[in-house]
């Protein structure tokens, strides 16, 4: 009783909240690159991207269940590391296919239509996937196998779940890898070329359709990884889990400058930290942070922090 | 090609539109009694978002009906239970009430589980002067709908207050943190009742944290609780949220017990939370581990039939049928007004969810069972009586 007790205003809590925010922001960043890359090449906001994230979690759930790692009750078996790897590969490939399928079926037929038509289609695809998922997986929340035994890791005054540290590490590796891929490989150059000027890129011999499909595939792979990482950290899957995560990641992309991959990373981290800091002082306002940020960015600096102030491609 | 794709999307969209569930039609029946039968209505949701609650209630009620009919029925008449699925929707509850009152002409109606659905049905029964007994609607306004509306479960104000008494007196805690779902009236209601009782006792609420519905990352709130120096965390939320909260509390290295209400009860709580809730407490309508003979008989019968132990909703479903039986027997005849009067006067009814009396507001005055989580079991610690909280 006589020991001085920490108050919610203390420095340790601030550090702890920063840790929470960086973990949350890493997830936003992983999803946000999907928005930003698609916007970069098509100037389309792919609102179905949040659903791809949701599907990423489910795509790893079903094989895990099939292999017997999702008991309905009782002891949870521990999962060998190579199975975790296989589940990641399964979720990533299935999401890549889903992303490419969405592009092929819903967006490619509308590529020459007005941007508004494509945007409305994106919202439609998002609703369609949410409802299909509810039919296929049922609306009941599902648990998730313990791919990694959750433990508490103490870093100075900050205590974080090991799954949160995994999120931060994997997100950092994936984002760096993506950046290198886009900047230093031929397919990456093709993506940048298409993003810069689709018609000229086609004249220069870039296969535009294939490049766009690849953009969707890569964005979806990042979302799949995010979906699985979050499911490992917060084992509850619902068909609606992509809605809020998708919207917030979209805000992160806008904040960082939509079209810019480093911007998506920066925007994601900033949004996560900002949410945690607001939640530290006023937890009832955390949900509003993302939308307030969106309004402010659009009013003050619509191109975002790292976005290009360039010609308007309408 | 494009046409084919468009029609594919249209077809998929239509498929989504036609996802209405099947309706379970009730049995045909006549007035309050028909020949050798007495007609009792049951309306709970066995499909939709809260289907498991309704299914458990129905399973419990069916066991009671089978027992009573086997033992000769009520005053020589066998129970004919007329059942309607209220589909987790208030409109369906209203429709079921109208059918039970005007078409099936039941003597007494039992239901619903969710307070919102009970509130939709109560005016219909009140207007038709048919006694309605809710097994498990805890919102105070339900029985305020009229003098024919009863309930046999405790109310949220008592539940919240009892948790505060338990935390302060039994566990000796003085600094409580509250974590509630701000979009859920059940959660905020319990949080407020806990807060006023705990502070009245002399305890301190060191922090009040809330979250929005469908949150799955509670780390921000948990960090604030960690910084507040609380010695107990009161989290009146449903089990789906609780298992995630418990894990995140543990991951941040907080080692204080957690306390909650009947929303925690589920056989999924411990498998999903792992050992994060070991040693924590929650208040419930009854305990499966209660050594009383009637409880153990019921638990055994239910487990044999359904392969799992009865939840408190099943126990309340079982009790509501016996409660109605006692009311009819005390009334002496199959007359709705007399059954109502008998119900209002029931004293010391011995159910599996405890011994209770009906008070002047047609609510049950009954104890709450405080349980502790040990392994996968919920062990009874003690019962708290209404007198201790008032």
Image: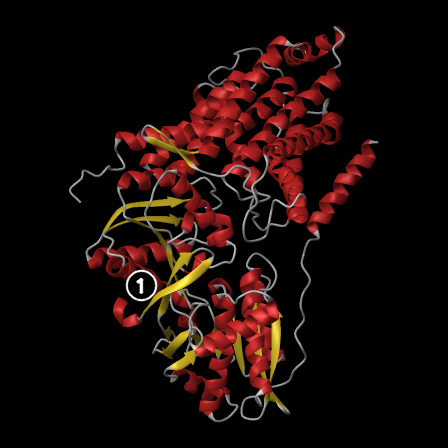
From the image, which quarter does the C terminus of chain B lie in? Answer: bottom left
Q: Quadrant of residue A200?
A: top right
Q: Is residue B50 above or below residue B295?
A: above
Q: Residue furthest left?
A: A2
Spot occupied by residue B56 in the image (x, y as percentages of width and height): 55, 66
Spot occupied by residue B47 in the image (x, y as percentages of width and height): 61, 61
Spot occupied by residue A220 in the image (x, y as percentages of width and height): 63, 28
Q: Is residue A182 above or below residue B138?
A: above
Q: Looking at the picture, tell me which residue is in the foreground, B22 or B381.
A: B381
Would residue B88 be found to the left or right of residue A267 on screen? right
Q: Quadrant of residue A77?
A: top right
Q: Is residue A91 visible?
A: yes
Q: Quadrant of residue A202?
A: top right
Report the residue at 31% width, 63% height from top.
B162
Residue annotated with mark 1:
B162
Q: Crowdedness of circle 1 by 10 Å Cα count: few (<14), some, many (20+)?
A: many
Q: Looking at the picture, tell me which residue is in the foreground, A259 or A80.
A: A80
Spot occupied by residue A243 in the image (x, y as percentages of width and height): 56, 38
Q: Looking at the picture, tell me which residue is in the foreground, A38 or A314.
A: A38
Q: Is residue B245 above or below residue B78?
A: above
Q: Chain of mark 1?
A: B
From the image, which quarter does the N terminus of chain B lie in? Answer: top right
Report the residue at 22% width, 54% height from top.
B203
**Colour scheme of the picture:** secondary structure
Report the residue at 47% width, 48% height from top.
B273
């Amino acid at each position: 009783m006589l020991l001085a007790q920490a108050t919610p205003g203390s420095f340790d809590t601030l550090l702890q909240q920063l840790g929470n925010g960086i973990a949350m922001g890493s997830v936003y960043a992983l999803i946000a690159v999907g928005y930003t890359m698609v916007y970069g090449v098509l100037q389309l906001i792919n609102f179905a991207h949040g659903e791809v994230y949701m599907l990423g979690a489910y795509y790893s759930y079903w094989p895990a269940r099939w292999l017997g790692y999702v008991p309905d009750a009782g002891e949870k078996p521990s999962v060998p590391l190579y199975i975790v790897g296989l589940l990641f590969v399964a979720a990533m490939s299935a999401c890549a296919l889903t992303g490419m399928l969405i592009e092929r079926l819903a967006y490619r037929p509308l590529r020459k239509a007005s941007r508004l038509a494509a945007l409305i289609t994106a919202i439609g695809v998002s609703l369609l996937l949410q409802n299909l998922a509810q039919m296929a997986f049922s609306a009941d929340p599902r648990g998730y196998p313990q791919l990694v035994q959750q433990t508490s890791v103490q870093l100075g005054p900050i205590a974080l779940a090991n799954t949160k540290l995994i999120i931060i590490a994997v997100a950092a590796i994936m984002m760096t890898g993506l950046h290198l891929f886009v900047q230093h490989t031929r397919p990456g150059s093709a993506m940048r070329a298409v993003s810069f000027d689709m018609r000229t890129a086609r004249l220069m011999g870039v296969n535009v359709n294939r490049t766009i499909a690849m953009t969707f595939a890569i964005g979806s792979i990042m979302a799949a990884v995010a979906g699985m990482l979050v499911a490992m950290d917060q084992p509850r899957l619902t068909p609606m889990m992509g809605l809020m995560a998708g919207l917030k990641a979209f805000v992160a992309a806008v904040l960082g400058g939509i079209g810019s991959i480093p911007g998506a990373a920066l925007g994601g981290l900033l949004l996560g930290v900002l949410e945690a800091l607001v939640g530290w002082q006023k937890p009832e306002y955390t949900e509003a942070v993302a939308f307030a940020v969106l309004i402010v960015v659009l009013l003050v600096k619509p191109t975002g922090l790292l976005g290009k102030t360039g010609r308007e491609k309408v | 090609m494009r046409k084919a794709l468009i029609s594919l999307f249209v077809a998929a969209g239509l498929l989504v539109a036609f996802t209405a569930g099947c309706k379970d039609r009730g049995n045909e029946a006549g007035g309050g009694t028909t020949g050798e039968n007495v007609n009792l209505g049951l309306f709970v949701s066995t499909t939709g978002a809260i289907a498991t609650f309704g299914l458990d209630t129905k399973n419990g009620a069916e066991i009671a009906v089978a027992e009573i009919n086997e033992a000769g029925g009520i005053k020589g008449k066998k129970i004919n239970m007329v059942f309607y699925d209220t589909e987790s929707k208030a409109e369906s509850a209203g429709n079921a009430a109208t059918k039970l009152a005007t078409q099936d002409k039941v003597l007494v109606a039992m239901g619903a589980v969710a307070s919102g659905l009970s509130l939709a049905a109560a005016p219909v029964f009140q207007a038709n002067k048919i006694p309605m007994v809710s097994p498990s609607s805890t919102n105070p306004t339900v029985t305020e709908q009229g003098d024919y509306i009863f309930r046999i479960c405790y109310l949220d104000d008592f539940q919240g207050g009892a948790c505060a008494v338990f935390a302060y007196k039994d566990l000796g805690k003085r600094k409580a943190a509250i974590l509630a779902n701000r979009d859920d009236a059940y959660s905020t209601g319990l949080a407020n009742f806990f807060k006023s009782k705990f502070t009245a006792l002399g305890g301190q609420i060191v922090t009040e944290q809330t979250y929005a519905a469908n949150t799955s990352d509670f780390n921000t709130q948990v960090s604030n609780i960690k910084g507040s120096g609380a010695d107990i965390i009161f989290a009146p939320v449903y089990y789906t949220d609780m298992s995630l909260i418990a894990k995140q509390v543990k991951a941040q290295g907080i080692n204080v017990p957690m306390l909650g209400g009947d929303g925690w009860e589920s056989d999924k709580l411990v498998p999903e939370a792992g050992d994060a809730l070991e040693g924590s407490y929650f208040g419930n309508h009854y305990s499966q581990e209660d050594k009383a003979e009637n409880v153990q008989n019921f638990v055994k019968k239910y487990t044999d039939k359904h392969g799992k132990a009865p939840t408190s909703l099943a126990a309340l479903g079982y009790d509501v049928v016996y409660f109605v039986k006692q009311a009819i027997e005390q009334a002496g005849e199959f007359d709705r007004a007399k059954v109502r009067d008998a119900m209002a006067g029931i004293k010391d009814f011995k159910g599996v969810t405890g011994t209770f009396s009906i008070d002047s507001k047609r609510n049950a005055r009954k104890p709450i069972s405080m349980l502790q989580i040990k392994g996968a079991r919920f062990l009874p610690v003690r019962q708290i009586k209404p007198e201790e909280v008032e």
